[in-house]
Amino acid sequence: MPSSRTLLIPAIMWASSAAAGHAASLELKPSPSLPRLTHEFPCRVDKQATANPTEPWRAQLSRRSAVYVVQHLEKACRILADRRDNDSQLVPETNAILLEIYNSALRPIYRSYPDLETTGAPEWRPKKVFRAKPKDIRRDTALTLIKELRRPQLNISQLGAKSADRAADKSEAQKTLQLFLDAAAELSFAYQISYSAYPDLFEKLFDDIPFQPRTNESDAAFRKNAPPLGSVRLSDSALALVKQLMREVRRLTKKDDEIAYISRVIGSKRKGPTDTNWTDEGPHWGLGTYSRAQLPPDVIDNVQGVEIVFGVEDPSLLQGKVVDVRSNKLFVHD
């Protein structure tokens, strides 16, 4: 089955607040429980011998934005370096990623704020997620930051998969993947300020999502997982939530061919820029969308004027049931 353009409820709420331009102030307070990273932090691996000798591009952003970005990049580098130090086979590829982060993102920031290179970013923890405004980061810097950090982020994911394949057992593989996921997430947090300052850049993400065409196999999967048409109801609050999602998706994509999709998610984890740990959301009902061109017409239901597809491994879990909302989360009852 093709991947949906899933917008889980927390994600769509972040998108809405970013688009509305709600920018919380960055409250910086020293945290003595966190160790200070010295100027020898791992992103500068073999700097004197291998760093790019050319002058880097200059990042144009406010100091608080610079501190925010450097904090997350330093954390990503520390995670990668710790993993590298425990697995000699990872040394060449990990060092290449660390150096790439340094050359492509950190050096440009240090051109504007040299003291951050000398001492490292202050180890302060904001109480709220920092949502930048255009005054905090120039548009060309926002665009470049996204581009330059997506590349090492992809490399981190690929290296994580490669490292997990060599794990002795499933438990070790999961722990390994989690470490690389942590590092990749920190890069996402670093360039998230680009999206909060310029919501239209977030909207363009939808243009980058690969379109997976409809196939006989995908049609069969949709049909296997769909309860009979008309057998699932939506509560008023669930219907309102679906309509809210579709309005937001159509605004972002500038298209009207997206179909709502409610499915059973086996498990997922969530983490924000100010979170220490991941929140395990476990099995739950997810809300997303598919393009009409990806769906067999006979699985598209119509509930009170809203076109929607339901999918679950055991369709009897939905047949004759009501999809409802509690605490901004979907659930199913009789």
Image (cartoon, helix red, strand yellow):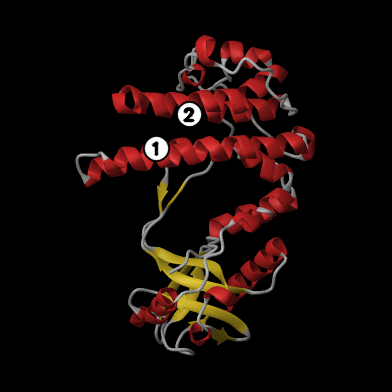
Q: Name the residue under label 1.
A: 159
Q: Give the mark nearer the N terminus: 2 vs 1.
A: 2
Residue kind at label 1, given as amino acid type: Leu
Residue at image position (74%, 53%) is: 20
Res. 62 image quadrant: top right
How far is disc 2 from disc 1 in space, using C-alphas? 10 Å
Residue 142 in the image, given as x and y percentages of width and height:
70, 37
Measuring from the top left, give residue 309's x and y in whole percent: 50, 78
Please name the residue shown 61% across and 56% down the image: 13
Residue 208, visible in the rendered structure: yes
* Element carrying mark 1: helix
Q: Is residue 152 left or right of residue 244?
A: left
Q: Which residue is drawn at 43% across and 75% down?
A: 311
x, y percentage for residue 45? 47, 17
Spot occupied by residue 241 in the image (x, y as percentages of width and height): 59, 70
Indicate whether 85 appears above or below 223.
above
Q: Tell which of 7 and 89 is nearer to you.
A: 89
**Which residue is tagged 2?**
97
Picture quarter with the C terminus:
bottom left
Residue 151, compared with residue 68, is above or below; it is below
